[in-house]
Every structure is written in structure tokens, then in C-alpha cells.
Amino acid sequence: MSSAPSHAPKNTAPAAAGEEHKVSNFLRQVIEKDLATGAYASRQWGGGPGDAAFHAAGVPDPAKIRTRFPPEPNGYLHVGHAKSICLNFGLARDYGGVCHMRFDDTNPEKEEKEYVDSILDAVQWLGFGWQSRFNGKTEDHLYYASNYFDFMYRAAEHLITAGHAYVDEQSAEDMRVNRGDFGKPGVDSPFRTRSPEENLARFREMRDGQLADGAAVLRAKIDMASPNINMRDPAIYRIRRATHHNTGDAWCIYPMYTFAHPIEDALEQITHSICTLEFEDQRPFYDWLMERLIEGGLLKAPPPRQYEFARLNLTYVITSKRKLAQLVNEKKVSGWDDPRMPTIVGLRRRGYTPEAIQLFAERIGVTKSDSWIDYSTLDGCLREDLENKAHRGMAVLDPVKLVLTNWAEVFGSDGYTEDCTQPALPHSAIAEGQTPPPDRVFKIGKDVWIEREDFEEVPPKGYKRLFPGNVVRLKGGYVIECTGCAKDADGQVTEVHAKVIAGTKSGTPGADSVKAKAAITWVGAADGVSAEVRLYDRLFTDPQPDAGGKNFLDALNPHSLKVVTAYVEPSLAAAQPDQKFQFERHGYFVADRADHGVGGQVVFNRVTGLKDSWGK
């Protein structure tokens, strides 16, 4: 079976023999048991997806396990999908297998090529690929469920002829009522006793466009009295006249997800079909369908097995595609990649790194019970990743001018400037044998920018920064003594005044000749660059904004974005889009990947603070 045109992702190579695996969980235990017992050792691989005969003509499968990441291309992926990506691709990597990248594109009304492209980009950005390299041979495992429509139709006809499926022409309302509920068994459809021949003829009329949309569905014939409502003759095909992004108008009937998904897994020889807990009640149908198609010789044993894990519940976040779309459509955010959104494109633009998200997925683990993960855990993983990677720099976010009033007296001219240097990374962040990056260079002169909060005319108790008579160090520069300030007519401080103390420049023999109790960050007026800094915070004020039927819009944080005009040192102004930094004392920031550099703009997004301060 052919797939849609392939892309060229990075390879995710299998772990080396004997390589230590990550912290164990129930899925790793299942896989290790299956490998030890040879549960899937007899599988053949035909070189791509196919039926029983296709794989029987293949070779022993070189992949010890096969997993898959199967998104529906009907929206942008979010942080919950990121967990699933890391899980499926990570397990395949660690156990000498391969993870298939498969689009579950069986619903033409909601799917778009835009989403396909964004999903592929997200998976690769997270550090994973869908190629395998076994025995010197490279295979691409990018697949589309829509390429299996011919087989799915064939499987449906087999179920009909074997007496396991029938065409039901009840109205949608009658079908709903007759299905029963948890306290009442279902009622057989009046069409349930049709002969296989009648059902086959009617199904072909559905296929040929002779029936209107919604006029009939194909249902599996199982048990209308089953305590599991999902086993009460579920619908497996419906009529939909809609153009499909991959197959065009070739079909006017489309398989239901619960029918298509296990078939996709089987054709691809998936061993461990991993999904979230809401699909647990669907597993009996998954197994029933596999048994019927193996009995009919269409698929080969052993079939894939479905395993469920708890989805990610992250505080201060919503992951409903419908609600995320509502935020975009109602312009509560600027788009799918708004840095406040939990989408992967949003997280990426905010400044999160693939390594931090992988660490987060590993750290929260995999369980079968629902729980809430605090958002601070994700931020903690980011800080851990950036601590030794993000170059340092100084930025002033709420600037007020500091004038060194005796500058000309000390240095001979008000226009005189000196170069100051500071390391791009602290010594502790540089591994043994690693070449340290070049020092940052910036200028100090008569005028510099400081944070407004670094001056108090009447200091509170314990305040160690600038106030009249106090001595502080300009970090990387000179020690200065505050002499006062200038104010406007409203009493607002417009300038802070101080005297520079000669011979105290950092890195010189006299640097310690005058003791200062504090060092403050600053940016020189001579070479500082004006920048737009977007101070992002959590989008919601409620840790569970849509739980218990709450209107999530009521919990929108009115302070989730504050835009300020700041001054940054030259090393920051020279940043490339998406480059991350630690603004000393302020936190981690990223040069905006969309706007930074456009028309000469300097634009930074706050990723997170230096420590968790939410609600404090």
C-alpha cells in the first residue's frame, strides 16, 4: 500500500544493546515481558503496510516493537500530544523498534493540509523522526490512514458476508433511543435481520452514492444487550459527501474512527497501540474486530494490543481543541502560536526547548490513573535545560536614567566611554574541556539605564540598592555612590544621580578597594538598544479553568501579557530569532521567532522567571 509523499525527518536510532532504559513504568514492563516471551517474534514485515498475504511474503520483522503516533489532522498539537509523541517515539527508540508517523485522516470535513504540515514540523522539532535503519536499509514510516480505504472497504464487505455487519436505515434519533443506556439494554434494529446478500447490495449502493448523507450506516453486529454500550452494534461506516485532502472525491462513504484505527494498526504491524484512558471502553471492540478479520484471513496473528495511559492534565491549561479554537477565533489570543497557548507551536514561540519538553514528559511518568501536574514542573524542566545553555545578558525592563555626575571630572570628558566585559556563561556552566564562549562587551559612560525599582529616595528597611549616600556596584562596571535624584512636577523620578568612584572597575586591581553591599544590572546609554519585551504569564488564573462545567473564559488572566519598552545590551540586540538568553535577575527570554529582526525590530518574549513565583 502506498503512502503520501514522504518527508525527510531526523532519524531516531534504536538504543544500543544493553543501554540503560529510563525509569520503569507499566508500559515498559509490558514491552519487556513481550520481548522476553517472544510474543511478537513470529511477525513478518513486507516493507510497508499491508494485509496478511502481503506480510507473509516478507521477511522476519527487524523491528523488535512497532508503536505509532496517530494524530487526526484537524488542529494544532498541544502539550498533551507532546507527551504522547515522547512516549511512543521514546519507547520505540529504547527497545530497538520503530515508531510510525501516521495520520488518522478518516474525517474529511475537519482535516486540512495545514494541520498535516504543522504536525510533521512539531514532531521533528521535538527531536523525533519516522525513519528506520535496519540491516543497512532505510525505510520511511510516514503513513496516512486514507491510503488504507480500499482495505477498510474490503474488510467491511467481509464482515457483511460473514454475518458480522448490516446496513441500518433507522433515523439517527431512533438509533440513539434504541441503543439504550447504562441501565437499559438496547433494542435490535428492524434492519438487523437482513440477509448478508441484502446488506452487501445496500452497502454497495451507499458506496456508489445512491443514498443521501445520513440515510444509512453500516453497523457491526455484536450484542445490543452488552453492558459495554460501545459493543451495542457500533457504526463502522457512514455516508459523507466531502472532499478529502488526500483522496479527493474518490469516496462518499468513510469509516468510523473505532473501525479504522485497529485496522490501521494491524496493516502496519503495530505491536503496542498506546492511547489515552478514554479509549479503554473501546478496547473490546478493537479486539473483536481483530479476531473477525484474522478469522477471515485478511489479517495475520498476532494482532496489535491496545494499552491505555492517563492523559496529561496540566494546571492553568486547557487542551480541548474546540476551546483552544474558540480562544483563537474570538481573538482572546493572537493565534495558534500565541506564546500563551499550550500548543506546541505556542510553546516553541514562547521559548520552550525540545529538551525541556522531553525531560518534562519523562519526569511526569506514565500511569493509569488521572492526576494533575502543576505547571511549575514544566517551567522547572525548562530552567534545568537552559541553566547551562542560555547566554547571560543585561536588560532593563522599567528604565530610569542614572547620571554619573562626576564622569567628566574623573575621565576628562562627558563623552568618554569604556568597554566592560562579562562572561556569556558562568564558569560553572562550562564543562571540563569545553571552550567557553567569548565574553560579552558593552560600554559604560556618563549615562546608563537602571531599573526604576533599584532607587528609593527613602529606602525601606533592609534595602541595599541605590538611595542617597549608599554605595553599589554597577555589575561588570564601577562602584558608584548615590547622591540623589531629579523629579518632574508630579513628583515622578526622572533621573537618579550618583558619583563614579575611580579605580573600582570590575576585573581591575582596585575593584575591591571599596566595598559595596549590592550589585545592580544596567545598560549603557551609549550602546544600549531599545527593545520590545513581551512579559507573558499564565493564560488562566484558575488551576483547572474548565473543570466541573466552569466557563473557562471567566478565568482568563487579564495580566497574561504586558508589553514594555526596555533597553538591552548589544549582545542581546544581536540575537538570532529563537535564540534563548537569561536576562540577569529577570529570568529566561527568547528572541521572538516571528517578529524579532523584522524591519530592524528587537523583540523578546519572557519564557519564565528564574524561579517559580506564581501566586506569590
Image (cartoon, helix red, strand yellow):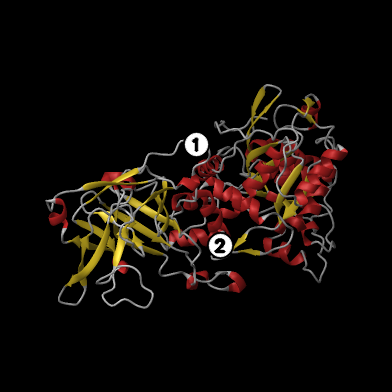
Camera-side residue: 49 or 98?
A: 98
Can you tell which mark lies on residue 434? Answer: 1
Q: Element type at marker 1?
A: loop
Can you tell which mark lies on residue 177? Answer: none
Camera-side residue: 414 or 603?
A: 414
Identify the residue at horizontal 80%, vertical 36% (top origin).
299
Identify the residue at horizontal 21%, vertical 74% (top origin).
492
Indicate the position of residue 551 as horizontal and vertical percent values.
Answer: 53, 72
Residue 432 seen in render: yes
Q: Residues within 10 Å of mark 1 (few under 14, many from 20)?
A: few
Amino acid carrying mark 2 in the image: Tyr
- Tell me: 179 left or right of 417: right
The quarter of the picture where residue 441 lies is: top left
Identify the residue at horizontal 69%, vertical 63% (top origin).
370
Can you tell which mark lies on residue 375? Answer: 2
The quarter of the picture where residue 534 lies is: bottom left
Camera-side residue: 11 or 75?
A: 11
Indicate the position of residue 174 as horizontal and vertical percent values.
Answer: 72, 64
